[in-house]
Amino acid sequence: METEKGNGNGLVRIQSKSSVCSKAGGEWGRYILYDPARGLIVTEDQLVRFNLIQTHGSKVLAQEEVAQSVHYLVVWDVGSKRKPQYEAAIADANGNVIVPRSAETWNTYVKFLELWQTATRVVPLEPQLEFVERVKEARDAWVIETPILTVTGKRVDYYDRRYAAYEVRTRISGIADIVEKLYAVAVRHGFAKGTYGGYIRRGPIGDDELKALKEEALSLLNAEKAVLLARWAEAVKARLASAREEVEAARKKLGVEKPASEPITAEDIISLFIQRGEEEAEEAEEAEEAEEAPAGELEFVPVAQTSVEQPFSSLISQTEKEMEVAPLPPAAAVKREELVKLHLLAFSLPSRYAAARTKYLIEREEGKSVLVERRVFEELASVIETARREAYDELRRAFAMVPELGVWIAVTDAAVEEAKRVASFVTGKILEGAVQKKLDLDAAKRVAGRVKVEAWPIYLEPERARALLEKAVAKLSEDAEELRARIEKAEKESMKKLLGKKLAEVEKLKMEFEKKLEALRG
């Protein structure tokens, strides 16, 4: 690998992945650390996370200790726009293929991606739990939130239909008896089990009775707090033990000997490759000495005590300097490895104005010829609007909207591929619509080229991540309630089925966000 020395700060310049992909004929690529002897791969997201690779303008720099191990994953999409299928090869800095192009190479990369995501998790030895209930009140509704269950009561008015809803949502098993007690509170106030979960009372309900319902639920929760906390701790301990086993198994496969309760550091990743380099050097030296030894004579070679060098101490001060160029989120009291990873949706969808064209006409005004400029919208505008509208439905499968901040976020790494799928979906819709309506295909391609849908990893302090996730869960809860109301109001069975499918998607996404939020609280 050809490298260019940096400014004496422990960094060397490496080839950009775009230039290597171009040489190898690929469509796109990723930086990786690769050890051919062990088949070990460190993925780009980890290299960026641990500051082993940095981008400064047009320059891409790598830490000197691992620069010689930097390779490039070159990727091709051999599937369709709706169902992408990937093949990949591993190349060096000159574009020479080291591992042949195949679907298996891509699958191997994906396996390492998942391994590192699991291995870099930190699982505490003991849970730190605090059972606190919070009450949120709005017009005609209230919510009691706790770490393991949520109780909701509200009054609903739709035209001439009036009813009240009461629902208990749980996040752990083993508390069914207490949930039944909470529902018994609603039964005492005339509620009956509803079709879509929760309890319903048809007819009006007064403010005083709605408030009384809340106070009784709160009183029951306080009475059962000790039991709930004990069962929560039991459930969390079991999950922590299982999670520790999973994390330590992943670390063992990668060669990282560290308990799950301690975070992986950049130093650990560097040592994987330095240690291998030292072993190879020792083997080569021993081979040379064996060749030089006279035939028939035995030479005693003392076994060196293996130790991993610790070159990272000098890197810490350098990293602090680099942070002025590429700042991390403000986390003075939080270690970098404790930051919470989410995905921010970065997207740009063309509007109907992308299909507008300027037309110049000569018109007569007051007996004079006047050149008039008019904006004309071609039929492609309706195709774009349809694709744009459907794109939002597709995005809601993996991303949640946070209206207060005007952002969309996701909690799993699957969001990266989901964003790519939505981008392909929108592009395909625009091109297919143009073909079906026999419109200008070149114009449609230009518009489709403006589609951008990406999921960007972001790292937040736990408190900020928790606040963001709480807002997202609240919005998903509102969406679910709205869909339930629409289902009850719908008259056609086909519409109920469609709305039910959307509700299932919202509930599934909400569970993912609640799981992430619960992990932060635990």
Image (tube, grey):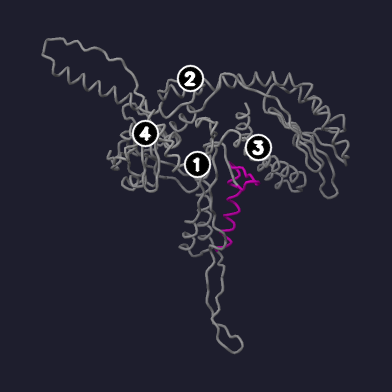
The quarter of the displayed image where residue 97 is located: top left
Q: Which residue is mark 1?
A: 417
- Badge 3 or badge 1: first in the primary sequence: 1
Mark 4 touches mark 2? (CB < 8 Å): no
Please give the count of numbered marks on the rendered protein. 4
Q: Secondary structure at mark 2?
A: loop
Which label is found at residue 259?
A: 2
- Badge 1 or badge 4: first in the primary sequence: 4
Q: Which residue is mark 3?
A: 470
Q: Which residues are magenta?
A: 380-406
Q: Quadrant of the N terminus?
A: top left
Mark 1 touches mark 4? (CB < 8 Å): no
- Badge 4 or badge 3: first in the primary sequence: 4
Mark 4, mark 2: which one is toward the viewer?
2
Give above or below for 324 relative to 303.
below
| 3D distance between C-alphas at marks 4 and 2 | 23 Å
Three-letter residue code for mark 2: Pro
Mark 3, mark 1: which one is toward the viewer?
3
Q: x%, y% of residue 398?
A: 58, 41
Q: x%, y% of residue 224?
A: 77, 21
Q: Nearer the viewer, residue 509 or 411?
A: 411
Three-letter residue code for mark 1: Glu
The quarter of the displayed image where residue 230 is located: top right
Which label is found at residue 33?
A: 4
| 3D distance between C-alphas at marks 2 and 3 | 31 Å
Mark 2 touches mark 3? (CB < 8 Å): no
- Badge 2 or badge 1: first in the primary sequence: 2
- Badge 2 or badge 3: first in the primary sequence: 2
Q: x%, y% of residue 474?
A: 68, 39
Three-letter residue code for mark 4: Leu
| 3D distance between C-alphas at marks 4 and 3 | 37 Å
Compared across the picture, whether 283 is left or right of 46 comes to left
